[in-house]
Image: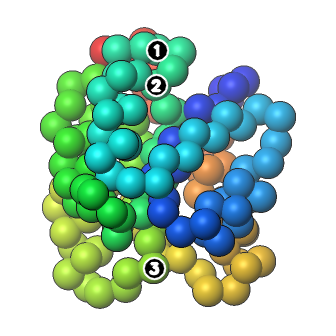
Amino acid sequence: MLTQLNILLVEDNADDINLIKRALDTPINQVEVIQNGQLALKYLAEVSDSVDKKPDIIILDWNLPEKNGREILSQIKSSPQLKRVPTVVFTGSDIDTTVLEAYNLHSNCFIQKPTDADEFVNAVQAMVNFWLNVVQLPSKSDYR
C-alpha cells in the first residue's frame, strides 16, 4: 500500500473536478489537476523521469480541449517511462466505439461517469482504491 498517492486528473469540467477532488479528499492523496490535453502532455513530459513526481494513477477525460483523451492516452502508452502507470478513462462518453478505441490504445480501464453525484463520488473512490490498494503494481522505480 502506498503512503502518498500522486494522482493526475486530466479533466476540463469544473463540476467534475470538484466531485473528483471531494472523492479523493484524504491526507494521503496529492491531486494534480490539468484542464487541457496540451498542458497534460507537457506536465507528463516534465515528470516522466521522476520517481517521486510521476503519477501513481492517471484519471483521463476523453473529451478535452487542445489535445483529446485519445491523443494523451496514445502518448502515455507509447512512453517507456509512463506506459505502466494505470490510466483510467473516466468520461461521459458512452459510445461503444469510444470504449473500444480506449482499450485499443491500452487504457487500463474505461468508466462512464455516473450522472448522480453520490454515485460519481463512489465510482471515483472505488476506482482509486482498486488501482492503488487492491491490485499489485510494479514499484515506481520499475517504471523507468
The answer to which image quadrant residue 123 occupies is: bottom right
| Nearer to me, 34 or 144 | 34
Does residue 106 appear anywhere in the picture? no
Element type where label 3 sits in the image: loop
Q: Position of residue 143 (x, y in %)?
A: 35, 21
Instruction: Categorize mark 3 by other alpha carbons within 10 Å: few (<14), some (14-19), many (20+).
Output: some
The answer to which image quadrant residue 86 occupies is: top left
Q: Earlier in the sequence, mark 2 or mark 3?
A: 2
Q: Position of residue 119 (x, y in %)?
A: 71, 78
Do callouts 1 and 2 mark residues in contact (Cβ within 8 Å)? Answer: yes
Using residue 113 as the reference point, say whether residue 82 is left or right of it: left
User: Which quadrant is home to the C terminus?
Assistant: top left
State the residue at coordinates (27%, 57%).
Answer: 66
Using residue 120 as the reference point, say whether residue 105 is left or right of it: left
User: Which quadrant is home to the N terminus?
Assistant: top right
Using residue 69 as the reference point, say whether residue 140 is left or right of it: right
Per the image, the residue denoted by label 3 is 92
Going by the numbered disc 1, the residue's amino acid type is: Val
Which label number is shown at residue 54? 2
Using residue 57 as the reference point, say whether residue 77 is left or right of it: left
Q: CA distance from mark 2 to mark 3?
A: 26 Å
Instruction: Categorize mark 2 by other alpha carbons within 10 Å: few (<14), some (14-19), many (20+).
Output: many
Instruction: Categorize mark 1 by other alpha carbons within 10 Å: few (<14), some (14-19), many (20+).
Output: some
Per the image, the residue denoted by label 1 is 51
Going by the numbered disc 3, the residue's amino acid type is: Gly
Q: CA distance from mark 1 to mark 2?
A: 6 Å
